[in-house]
Amino acid sequence: MPSRRLPDPELIPSVGKPEYDQCYTFAMKTAISIPDPIFQSAEALARKLKTTRSDVYARAVALFVQQHSEQDVTARLNAVYASEDNRLDKSMARMQAQTLKRHSTW
C-alpha cells in the first residue's frame, strides 16, 4: 500500500485558526482497537440506522457507562439496606396476611 503524504499545513487556510483548532465535531476524538467482527457489525448497524460510525460508538459507550452507573447505585442501595433492619412490623405483616387471604384465588 503506498504511503499517503499529508498536505503542507501552510497550504490549508483553516489550520491555526481558533475555529479549526476547536475541532470540527465539537467532540473528543479518540482511536481505539476493536476486533474485526465488531467493527464490521458496527459498520452494518451504522448503515442500517443511517447514521455515522462515530454515532454508533458514542451511543454504545454512553449505554455502557449508564449501565455501570446504575450498577453503582444498586450496590450503594444494597449496602444501605444490608445494614438496616428490613423485617416487617408484626402488625403490618398481619394486615398483609389478612389482605392476601381475602383477595387470593389460590
Image: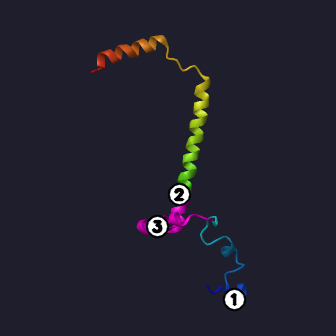
Disc 1 residue type? Leu
Q: Is residue 67 left or right of residue 17?
A: left
The residue that appears at 52% across and 68% down in the rendered structure is 53
The image quarter containing residue 78 is top right
Q: CA distance from mark 2 to mark 3?
A: 12 Å
The residue segment tinted magenta is 32-60
User: Residue 102 placed where, x, y %?
Assistant: 30, 16
Q: Does residue 65 sit above or below 98 in this rendering?
A: below
User: Residue 22 placed where, x, y %?
Assistant: 67, 70
The residue that appears at 66% across and 74% down in the rendered structure is 19
Q: Earlier in the sequence, mark 2 or mark 3?
A: 3
The residue that appears at 58% across and 45% down in the rendered structure is 69
Residue of label 3: 46
Magenta highlight on residue 7: no
Residue of label 2: 60
Q: Earlier in the sequence, mark 2 or mark 1?
A: 1
Tag 1–tag 3 contact (CB < 8 Å): no
Labelled disc at residue 11 = 1
User: Residue 46 placed where, x, y %?
Assistant: 46, 67
Disc 2 residue type? Ala
Q: Does residue 90 sit above or below 15 in this rendering?
A: above
The residue that appears at 67% across and 81% down in the rendered structure is 14
Disc 3 residue type? Ala
Magenta highlight on residue 37: yes
Q: CA distance from mark 1 to mark 3?
A: 34 Å
The image quarter containing residue 97 is top left
